[in-house]
Amino acid sequence: MNSKTRTAWTFLAPMLLVLILVAVWPLGRTIWFSFTDANINDLSATKFVGFENYFGEYGLFANPNYTDGFFASDWGLSILNTLKFSVVSVTLETLMGLGVAMLLNQDFKGRTFVRTAVLVPWAIPTIVSAKMWGWMLHDQFGIINQWLVDFGLIADKIAWTAQPEYALWTVVAVDVWKTTPFMALLILAALQTLPKDCYEAAEVDGVHPLRVFWKVTLPLIRPALMVAVIFRLLDALRVFDLIYVLTSNNNSTISMSGFVRREMVDNGYMGYGSAASTALFLIIGLCTVLAIKLSRMKLGED
């Protein structure tokens, strides 16, 4: 081993040690607990049960109550809810963030102030914004219901965060309000790096602005856009706080992280909850790999 390699490992060692302590060790313990019947009330009586928590009689993927299909079970429903939330929210945030970024990229008076103001929803802590929207959407004294009634858009006040047909999409709307500025900021950073000569040439040639967007702007910012989508997808797939604060333990909106929390904390089933946590980790990893593969294929075609 030469001196440069030794020096590199010397500088990397503290970071690797911290990574092992805060990531690898907890992950390893979680995976181990997923193969046991550990109960938070008596960890000393823990026994190894193999794949019982995954495919056993009452496992995550082999519950005998699946007469109505896998997604009718609590775990299956949490997967479905998380995927719905992730796909819809990330899609809307990307489209709206792109629109906001295009507007903020224009040269107009007060642009700096508008850029700062747009970031306010993202700067508010998730718990705070969730409580704020929870009060505004309250079915009795919430201002949203009052406005809708006053304008004649609804006849009776709606329990937005309690009724199953509205709850999940209400959470999606709040998440889009909060996270669109984040996407806009990342896309705006990409727009700021684009060469000006391409647009000057297009303007001289009289090319329609919409065609310039599709043929010039979008291809040039696509790598940064893909990175933003992947980061946001990772965040959306592990959502917990926003859903829990707005809808608590409502089964119609429970996410995979919410399911893990319920089994481990409320019910005390450390082994079963660890199995769900491990499955969540694998699902997020699979979705990330697929998203990266898709982005590389798309970029390769371009």
Image (spheres, rainbow, N blue to C red):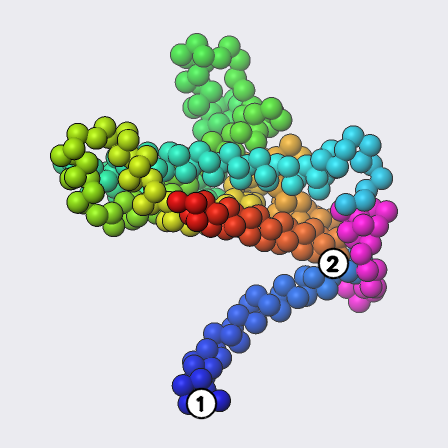
Residue underneath mark 1: 2
Residue 88 position (above or below residue 276) = above
- Residue 11: x and y in percent read 43, 80
Location of residue 23 in the rendering, given as x and y in whole percent from the top left corner:
57, 66
The boundaries of the magenta stretch are: 43-60
Mark 1 residue type: Asn
* Residue sitting at x 60%, y 24%: 165
> Counting residues from the N terminus, which is met first, the one under dot 1 or under dot 2?
1
Q: Nearer the viewer, residue 100 or 196?
A: 196
- Magenta span dominant secondary structure: loop
Q: Position of residue 233 (x, y in %)?
A: 50, 45
- Residue shown at the point (80%, 36%) measured from the top left: 66
- Name above or below for residue 244 compared with residue 147: below
Q: How dense is the environment of label 1, judged by Cα within 10 Å: few (below 14), some, or many (20 and up)?
A: few
Mark-to-mark CA distance, 1 and 2: 42 Å
Provide the residue designation for mark 2.
34
Q: Residue at x 18, y 45 (%)?
A: 196
